[in-house]
Image: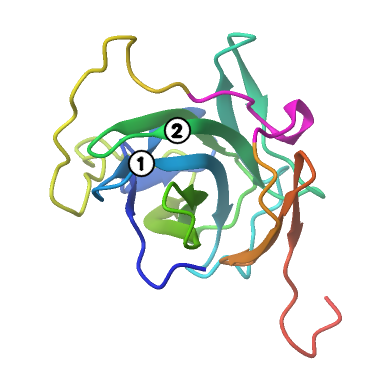
């Protein structure tokens, strides 16, 4: 793995508070190349958890998480092993100072536990220099409040890092394709990485995501 990340992974538009049972709330997972080299085979993952490290992933029946599939023009569930987590797509190539945005939405259901929540985003990518495989991630906090709580005035969170200058390429902005693991992957990178509480295996034309268990734990 690369020692330093070459991407800025960000979440934008997520409310600071979400009332349980208030329906879907849209936001975006943004990945920008803030390096001087072209990145290749970027794979994107996302999840929702009660903790920053992703050790306490929400059950998808409590907190629903969806990503937009641009090919089928529909929202698709992230529901790996019954948890709100999954693979959301890839980009073949991302030039310096370019950015991709993955539309997403979250639904905190009425019986979801009140308290802290985090949306997690991550990317694994290959460096065009061929020296290493890179990784970047983000965890944004929000608070789940009781059903019917007035959350008016709660501003969506903004990006926490310096903005990236986005130059529009002649053919348009880079696409995010292949929403969800069922559509496969453009990458053949033989990588095993940890994304918060997720074990991610990338290779052989597919991405597999499983919940990582704590050391010495049976659950």
Magenta includes 93?
A: no
**Splitting the image into 4 quarters, where does residue 98 fall?**
top left
Q: Is residue 161 left or right of residue 142?
A: left
Residue 132 visible: yes
Most common SS among magenta residues: loop
Residue at 35%, 41% (x, y): give it.
38
**Residue that sits furthest to the right in the current view:** 218
Q: Nearer the viewer, residue 208 or 66?
A: 208
Residue at 38%, 43% (x, y): give it.
149
Of the image marks 2 and 1, the number of the one nearer the N terminus: 1
Q: In this view, does 214 lie to the left or right of 74?
A: right
Residue at 59%, 33% (x, y): give it.
89
Above/below status of 195 relative to 79: below
In which quadrant will I find the C terminus? bottom right
- Secondary element under disc 2, as helix, strand or loop, is strand
The magenta segment is 176-186
Which residue is the site of mark 2?
A: 93
Residue 122's spot in the image, x, y percent?
49, 52
Q: Which of the numbered marks, if any, corresponds to residue 96? A: none
**Splitting the image into 4 quarters, where does residue 175 fall?**
top left
Q: Do the residues labelled 2 and 1 touch (CB within 8 Å)?
A: yes
Residue 216's spot in the image, x, y percent?
79, 90
- Secondary element under disc 1, as helix, strand or loop, is loop
Above/below status of 39 relative to 99: below
Which residue is the site of mark 1?
A: 38
Residue 209's spot in the image, x, y percent?
73, 53
Task: Tell me the CA gap for discs 2 and 1.
Answer: 7 Å
Residue 117 visible: no
């Amino acid at each position: 793995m690369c020692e330093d990340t070459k991407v800025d992974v960000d979440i934008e538009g997520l409310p600071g508070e979400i009332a349980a049972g208030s329906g879907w709330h849209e936001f975006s997972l943004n990945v920008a190349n803030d390096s001087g080299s072209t990145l290749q085979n970027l794979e994107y993952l996302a999840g929702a958890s009660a903790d920053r490290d992703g050790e306490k992933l929400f059950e998808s029946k409590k907190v629903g998480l969806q990503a937009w599939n641009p090919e089928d023009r529909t929202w698709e569930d992230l529901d790996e092993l019954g948890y709100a987590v999954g693979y959301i797509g890839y980009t073949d190539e991302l030039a310096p100072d370019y950015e991709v945005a993955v539309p997403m939405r979250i639904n905190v259901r009425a019986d979801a536990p009140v308290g802290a929540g985090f949306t997690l985003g991550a990317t694994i990518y290959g460096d065009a220099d061929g020296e290493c495989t890179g990784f970047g991630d983000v965890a944004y906090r929000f608070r789940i409040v009781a059903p019917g709580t007035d959350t008016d005035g709660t501003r969506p969170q903004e990006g926490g890092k310096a903005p990236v200058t986005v130059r529009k390429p002649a053919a348009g902005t880079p696409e995010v394709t292949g929403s969800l693991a069922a559509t496969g992957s453009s990458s053949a990178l033989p990588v095993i990485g940890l994304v918060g509480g997720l074990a991610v295996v990338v290779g052989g034309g597919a991405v597999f995501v499983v919940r990582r268990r704590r050391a010495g734990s049976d659950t």
